[in-house]
Amino acid sequence: MRVIEVKDYREMSERAAAHILDYVNGMKSCTLGLATGGTPIGTYRSLVEAYRNKKVSFHHVYTVNLDEYVGLSAAHPNSYRFYMQENLFNHIDIPSEHTHIPNGMAADLAEECRRYEELIERLGGVDLQLLGIGINGHIGFNEPGTSFSSRTHLVKLTESTRSANARFFSNPEEVPTHAITMGIETIMRSREILLLAGGIKKAEILYKLFTEPVDEQIPASILQTHPNVTIIADSEALSRVKEKKVFIV
Ligand code: PGA
C-alpha cells in the first residue's frame, strides 16, 4: 500500500481527482468503481471542475458504484443514485447508460446482486476503484465479519454504520437497515484501488489498517494483500499512525 499524506480535505480531493483524471485521459475506455459518503464529494467537485475547464471527457468511461440502500428509489435524496447524479453524473458528459448502481428497489434482491456481479464481469472488471473507509473498517457496506470471498450481496447494516450515516438523514430512524454492496472479493478484483481518508475520526481505523493482521473483523485489512493500492490521507487521519511511529512504505 502506497501512502500519500496531504494536509487537508481539499488537498486530498485535488490529489484524488488528479489521479482519476490521469487515468481516464490515458485510457480509450475504462470502468471506474465509485464510492459515496462524505469523503469523495470534494473529489467529484474537482472532477466536475476539470470537465468544465475542458481538461477531460467522460464519454468513454463506465462506472459501477459500490453500494446502494435497500428501499430508497433513485428519486430519494438519500439514495446513492441521487447522490451520484447530484454530485457527478448530472454535471459531466458520461452517457447515463454507462452509469451503474445496484437497484435497492428490486423485487428480487438476491437476483439483483447476481445481475450486478455479472454486469461488472461483462464490463471487464473494475479498472480503478475509489474507496472510503468506515470507522469500523468497512469498505463498501461490507461490515466486520464479512467473508473475504464475498461477491455482491445483501447486508444488514450495523448500528455503528447507521449512526455514522444518520447525519445525512433528517430523522436517524429513516436510515435504511439493509443495503446491497459489492463484496470484498469483487472489490479486491479491481486492478487498482484508491482509498481516501480524511479527518480525525479516521485516525484509529487507519492505525489498525497498518498494524493489525489481515482479519475479516477489519474488512479493509484485506487491502494489505492487494498489489496496487494507493491511500491518500490527510494529516489528521494519519495522526495516530505518526504518533506511534508506524513505518509505512
Ligand atoms: P464517509 O464514509 O466518507 O462518509 O466517512 C466512508 C465509508 O463509510 O465508507
Image (tube, rainbow, N blue to C red):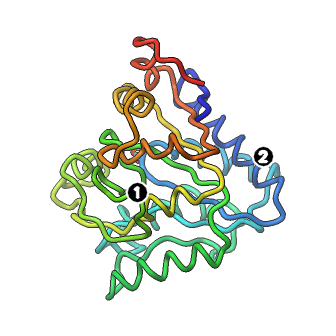
Judge by depth and name the residue closer to the eye, 133 or 87. 133
Image coords of residue 243 (percent x, y) = 41, 11
Q: Residue at x 46, y 54 (%)?
A: 36
- Where's the C terminus, which quadrant? top right
From the top left corner, tell me how far across and down residue 65 is, in percent. 51, 63
Residue found at the far bottom of this picture: 107
Camera-side residue: 211 or 26?
211
227 over 91 or under it: above or below: above
Decide which of 19, 172 is in the foreground and name it.
Answer: 19
Q: Nearer the viewer, mark 2 or mark 1?
A: 1
Figure quarter occupied by ligand 1 = top left
Amino acid carrying mark 2 in the image: Asp
Q: Is mark 1 within 8 Å of ligand 1?
A: no
- Could you tell which of marks 2 and 1 lies nearer the N-terminus? 2
Q: Residue at x 53, y 42 (%)?
A: 195
Helix, strand or loop at mark 2: helix
Quarter of the image for residue 147 reads bottom left
Residue located beneath label 1 in the image: 148
Dividing the picture into quarters, in which one does residue 58 lie? Answer: bottom right
Q: Is residue 30 left or right of residue 37?
A: right
The response on whether ligand 1 sits within 8 Å of label 2 is: no
Vertical order, 203 against 165 (above or below): above
Q: Which mark is residue 22?
A: 2
Name the kind of residue labelled 1 in the image.
Phe
- Residue 79 at x, y percent in the picture: 38, 65
Q: Secondary structure at mark 1?
A: loop
